[in-house]
Amino acid sequence: MSSLTSDLSLTENITTIIRPPYFYISGFTGIPHMKYYYVFLSLVYIISLMGNTFVMIIIYVDRSLHSPKYIAVFNLALTDVCESTAQVPKLLDMFLFDRQFISYDQCLANLFFVFIFLFMQSFNLTILSYDRLVAICSPLRYHVLVTHRSMFQLTGAAWVGSLFPMMISVGLITRLSFCRSVVINSYFCDHGPLFRLAAPCSDVLPNIVLSYLIPSLVLYIPMTFIIVSYICILHALFTITLTQDRHRAVKTCVSHVILVAIFYLPITVTFLLQSLIPTNLRIINLSLTSVLPPMLNPIVYVLKTEDFKETAKKLIRRWFRKAVAKGLNKICRKAKQ
């Protein structure tokens, strides 16, 4: 009898975790002509893939770009490709072909990869900001402070800093029970809408704490560092006496400032005003924030960075000449035959 009682008490202490076989991504509801938006996202994705692949090829092929700064630029382009691929194909598959159901495991994988590459964007922009800070404020020590080794270390730390928080986030999601709704009010398996579904059935306090802590660590602290670094850069620019040198220093910062504004401004506005913004508008804004920076980053670097632009032109001319020479050789051989 005592053994039966103890077995019953043990059974009562066991917490059953309810994991649904699938979730439903609600996405964009009640918005007319949304298929045109999906066509737009497809074009953005193609341009992003082509642009960032082009940037990576140019940096890899040309030895003059094998500098510490372009390690960070290469990593930014790689992150852009991964971020777009983690979101856009699945989004198009779900909403163009009405496949809005996603399995539990796929949902966690989607959450994991989307946020890793979002965080990497933030860290990459911070590394590039550090490069500009040292180049303008301590130009004589640039080659001592910004080396290949230090850039690889910073890049490695950025990947670890992106992976570790998401491993914790996904781990905390797996302990939740989803006993009621399985409808996620977002366009992907978003962290906030996902853990809130478990609020009636589980203790989501650790998830809430993490949802405030992680953005501070991987978004707002890096953004603060970038702002402070540019205050220091502006102060340093005023101390440069030669107008030509000052103009050259400003030009080196313009492309980075544009990238920072493209990435951080929409995210900051969305999170600060999320209670005032309608759900559909918030979802569209977040989706644009996720897909536009990866498309615009390579365009900005090609147009605004002189050394990269000149190198790209040189390599394109060289490839074009080789292609023309190869074509002429084939024509000559056929003519001789």
Image (cartoon, rainbow, N blue to C red):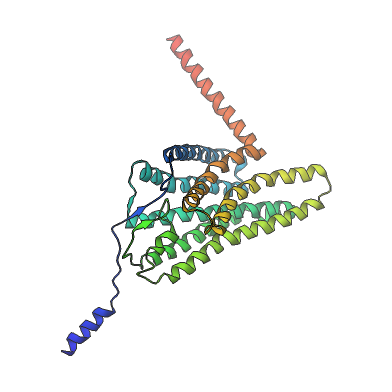
Q: Position of residue 253 (x, y in %)?
A: 68, 47
Side of 101 where 145 appears, left or right: right
Side of 19 where 73 appears, left or right: right
* Looking at the image, residue 311 lies above or below residue 209: above
Q: Position of residue 254 (x, y in %)?
A: 68, 45
Regarding residue 140, the answer to whether it shows in the image is no
The N terminus is located in which quarter?
Answer: bottom left
Q: Residue at x 55, y 48 (%)?
A: 76
* Looking at the image, residue 17 lies above or below residue 31: below
Q: Position of residue 272 (x, y in %)?
A: 57, 59
Side of 185 where 6 appears, left or right: left
Side of 158 where 139 appears, left or right: right
The C terminus is located in which quarter?
Answer: top left
- Return the residue found at the far left: 1
Q: Residue at x 69, y 57 (%)?
A: 229
- Return the residue found at the far bottom: 2
* Residue 219, quarter of picture: bottom right
- Return the residue found at the far right: 241
Q: Position of residue 142 (x, y in %)?
A: 70, 53
Q: Residue at x 47, y 38 (%)?
A: 40
Regarding residue 311, the answer to whether it shows in the image is yes
Tally of numbered discs: 0
Q: Nearer the viewer, residue 318 or 211?
A: 211
Q: Nearer the viewer, residue 29 or 332?
A: 29
Q: Residue at x 39, y 72 (%)?
A: 203
Q: Nearer the viewer, residue 274 or 144?
A: 274
